[in-house]
Image (cartoon, coloured by chain):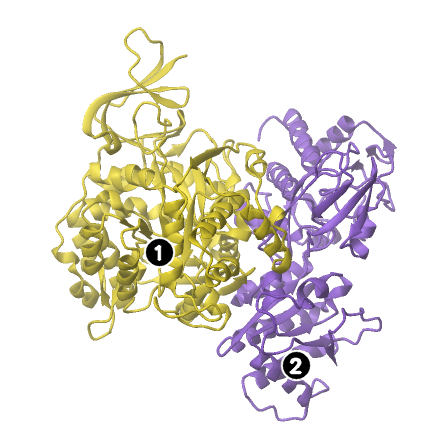
Chain colours: A purple, B yellow
Amino acid sequence: MTKGGTKLVRDAACPFCALACDDLVIERTSATALSVRDNGCELSRRFFARAAPKATPEIGGKPAALDDAVARAAQLLGRSHAPLFAGMATDVAGVRAALRLAERTGAVVDDLGSDGLFRNLRVLQDSGWMTTTLGEIRNRMDAMLIVGPDPAQAFPRFFERCVAPTDTLFGTRSNPRRLFRLGAAAPGTQALPDGLEITQIPCDDVQLPAALAALRASINGRAVAADRAAGIPLAALNEVAAALGSAEYGVVVWSAAAFEAAAADMILQVIVDLVRDLNRTTRCAGFPLGGNDNLIGANQTCTWQYGLPLRTSFAGGVPVHDPLINSARRRIVAAETDAVIWISAFRDAVPAGLPANLIALAPPGTKFDRAPAVQIPIGTPGIDHGGQIFRMDNVVALPLHGLLQRNLPSVADVLDRIVQALAKEQPSA
Amino acid sequence: MTYVKLAGGRIFDPANGRNDTAGDIFIRDGRIAADPGPAAKIERVIDIAGRVVMAGGIDIHSHICGGKMNLARTLMLGEHREHRTPATALTHAGTGHMTPSTAITGYRYAEMGYTAAFEPAMIAVNARQAHAELADTPMIDKGCYVVLGNEDAFLRMLAEGAPQATINDYVGWMIKATQALAIKAVNPGGISAFKFNGRDLGFDSASPHYGLTPRRIVSALAQAARDLGLVHPLHLHCNDLGVPGNLKTTLQTIESVDGLPLHLTHVQFHSYGTEGDRKFSSGAAAIAEIVNKRPNISIDVGQIMFGQTITASADTMTQHRNSGLGRPRKWVCMDIECQAGCGIVPFQYRDRNFVNALQWAIGLELLLLVEDPWRVFLTTDHPNGAPFTTYPHLIRLLMDRDFRDDRLRSINKHAAAASLLRNLRREYSLYEIAILTRAGPARILGLTGCGHLGSGAAADIVVYSDRPDREAMFARPDYVFKDGRLVVRDGSLVEVTWGATHVARPNFDSGVEREIGSYFERFQTVRSGNFAVADGEIEDVAGGRLVKHESDGARAP
């Protein structure tokens, strides 16, 4: 795929959203620049074309040699009583290195973007669920209910790749694909591929649990003693219930991160329950959208290596998971950390709330409000080096290939050097 | 080059016909060496006089990697909070007992003298994850069987009447692309049927949409394994798992292959009759009888043990059907990428429960009634019947009739009365245990380089004290060597090493790749080139090593 000097790279996988489309055609426009020629979207076009300005590591905002930056990071971590990983956005090799370092230093591992993940994990752990993957949706789905915002806002090619295709394994199913969206009215709804129509049922987040409960009642043939639920005419919900009930393979999608915190748990629980109910008589599956920046891969790797999800602390030499106490955001706000590592190998946007005592591994050109204690420019998997990332459906991992030589180290390289420097500083494990 | 000498052990090495033979074992450069004579330089002599020596144990069916295990770990968070293993200077921290984290899995296997374990249900599109997890599993050799027989690509091809030669090329490509050692079928046709809302699929029932019977699917895959020259036959999880009366399906399946090699897995779950007041009875005698007559058939047992465990299977049809029986009451079902599925249901097997008690007895009946220890394998279908760490207990049940009878008295009385077990006097010998857990698995998987103690084999060696309590003996070996390195002393880890990943590389016509590529492009959401796992993805991870078992099977006409 990525043979030597050829200008065009076919079937390249894109790490810039959790759909991880792997059909991109990318052109090397110069020795250091790329352009997405085919099958791009606004995200992939922007991020693959991102320039890598000349950048050196910095210590306290001043240029430094990589060795010195690594040594300084090791020193900060070695002295820290409560290190915290607040960003785990890297490929599987980078995550492995981060976990090695976390175990070595007794750190807490999380990602500031993991709220949606943990909402999903909570309902999964409470009751389990029935779910599906992108390929099943593409080929089988004949009715879809979207709960919450338009998926295309965060995942631009979702409809094109999974909802719109007419050339499916099963040709034309007996039912045409019927689509509904139950969620807050959005001003600028994405233009849909030709031939797709979505029945919009406006509903604010706080009303979603009640609306979904009424939908579930309708699915189960139970009477609702009102002609409206959560302000929605019951007839509209009955229509959704009828569509899912008569579908051969219904799908309910949601993006857990998008809901208001107070309503999220209830929304997810009703979705998971109504999907199960439908499976008494027909087939239906849930599909949680989310997991950008290989968050799914970080959580998967942590789970197989330690048996526990992210938001795990290695402080006592034994991993302890607590989804509330070990939230990176909470740890930072409560000042329960004295050294924060933030890894962002894919994006150059800095989230709010990072503290001053920061070790940042981010693409060159990443701008911080305050200079981090240590900043090390790193390469992006799928551009500067190869690697593996997980897709949002938790099943498919994709290979990434290095497309350019810009002499940027990988996250795994830098973190392994920090581990080595730490071993020199503190020989005992 | 210097040698390590294990002096004066009692050698149990069935592959080389040594049954309690007094002798020395020499290790050189990670391998077992012939006696180098008196002039050789011996770096270290370990006196093992009177102790039992066997090759390292090999587990042919143990779910140790892939997305289903992470789902199981996630679902049973409490279990992982309860069972925590701290880091040491030597080892990583980890958690879990039923579904231990990857490092803990490797440590526990090595501590009980196992030096290889094979994941029997790798979903093709999840192969990259399965190998990434195995890359993080130390101590043991490993490998995966790729799940085929429910993926739309294959069913479509078969329904359109593709010749066997095309099927063979497709299967060969799949093995290579997923870095598999063997092929597995799970409820053939049934996982696909469930996606079309089918809730059962008899062995001769036409599947929804494709109109294919499980009989046809089994035949095509068993033939492909044979034609490609794979050493391990089709590894088959039959239809109707857990259904009372499924004995009939299992017997039909055995008859259907007409002499082709076939391995039936976790047969305990497929040996149920419908006799008695409760319409649930043991079919072990009937299964054992036919296995004894058919040299082309091998089985592993899938013994259950009492207590909490979690079942993880690609068989969504069955797992959804049984979801109401699970404890605690939470479960997962997943349809996967037009290839397979995944179902996770926690279970508590209780000794006072008639069905569970009889399941326990059926597994033991099978192990005791199948006469040829080369064609039956000791498994708990980890973690589905019980965690692999119960193997020493299971070995004692086989070797110690008094112990077994004592346990039999503690289970549900009606189940105990209904079982043949009280009449079975057989006690396995150490030699038979060495076949069951070492020589047999190596032979059925084609692992010529391990499972025995002959010159040239990998120096995977276990030394036990001969204790009357066989459970204590097998739980805590005195010495375990992996590739010649001493890794366990008195049941505790002393060195961490990394085993190889075994893969099959059958010869096939690579012209099939074009058609597969266009299929992926039209219907799948991954391109075939990205679906395939490259050698480097395994070899470039620290400790990674591939052992390629090539075969040049005769092509089907």
Chain identifier of the residue bearing label 2 in the image: A
Image coordinates of residue A292 in percent, x first then y, are 70, 54
Left or right position of A35 against B15: right
Q: Is residue B382 above or below residue B253?
A: above
- Secondary element under disc 1, as helix, strand or loop, is loop
Residue denoted by label 2: A210
Mark 2: give few (<14), some (14-19) or many (20+) Cα within 10 Å. Answer: some
Tell me the residue at 76%/68% (across/down): A193
Chain identifier of the residue bearing label 1 in the image: B
Left or right position of B15 against B195: left
What amino acid is at disc 2? Ala
What amino acid is at disc 1? Gly
Q: Nearer the viewer, residue A53 or A420?
A: A53
Image coordinates of residue A122 in percent, x first then y, are 59, 63
Q: Nearer the viewer, residue B344 or A6?
A: A6
Q: Is residue A60 above or below residue A44?
A: above
Q: Is residue A339 visible?
A: no
> Within the image, what quadrant is residue B532 found in?
top right
- Secondary element under disc 2, as helix, strand or loop, is helix
Check the picture and name the quadrant holding the N terminus of chain A: top right
Mark 1: give few (<14), some (14-19) or many (20+) Cα within 10 Å. Answer: many
Image coordinates of residue B232 in percent, x first then y, are 36, 44
Residue denoted by label 1: B385
Number of on-image labels: 2
